[in-house]
């Protein structure tokens, strides 16, 4: 697996490797913190999703994209998401 040093979406953990992958603020400017799948026009796309639901969604997506097997992806998401800005308590 390739190594990437960021930025990562502070909601789902997705690497944001190109400007198109960044979400947008209310004024249309790129978000420094969130990807386009999680954040558009200054709002979360799914404001009610829980961290546990996000971990499940991301792990399934990673397994479907053959990034890693589901059990490994789920363990990674369960340990990584709590460190991200959206989920820190």
Image (cartoon, rainbow, N blue to C red):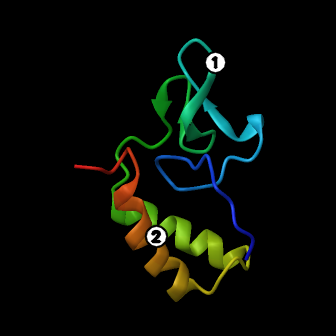
Q: Which residue is disc 1 drawn over?
A: 29
Residue nearest the observer in this picture, 50 or 22: 22
Relative to residue 42, is residue 29 drawn left or right? Answer: right
Dot 1 alpha-carbon crowd within 10 angstroms: few under 14, some 14 to 19, many 20 or more: few
Which residue is at a point 41% across and 51% down the rendered structure image? 84
The answer to which of marks 1 and 2 sits earlier in the sequence is: 1
What numbered label is drawn on residue 59?
none
Q: Position of residue 42 (x, y in %)?
A: 49, 24
Which residue is at a point 53% across and 16% down the rendered structure image? 26
Q: Position of residue 8 (x, y in %)?
A: 58, 50
Residue nearest the observer in this picture, 34 or 7: 7
Dot 2 alpha-carbon crowd within 10 angstroms: few under 14, some 14 to 19, many 20 or more: many
Q: Secondary structure at mark 2?
A: helix
Q: Position of residue 11 (x, y in %)?
A: 46, 48
What numbered label is drawn on residue 77?
2
Relative to residue 32, is residue 1 drawn left or right? Answer: right
Q: CA distance from mark 1 to mark 2?
A: 28 Å
Which residue is at a point 70% across and 76% down the rendered structure image? 67
């Amino acid at each position: 697996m390739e190594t990437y040093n960021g930025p990562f979406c502070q909601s789902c953990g997705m690497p944001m490797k190109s400007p198109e992958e960044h979400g947008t603020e209310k004024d249309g400017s790129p978000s420094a913190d969130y990807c386009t799948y999680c954040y558009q026009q200054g709002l979360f796309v799914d404001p009610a999703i829980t961290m546990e639901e996000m971990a499940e969604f991301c792990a399934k997506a990673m397994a479907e994209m053959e990034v890693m097997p589901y059990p490994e992806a789920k363990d990674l998401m369960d340990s990584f998401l709590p460190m991200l800005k959206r989920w820190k308590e």
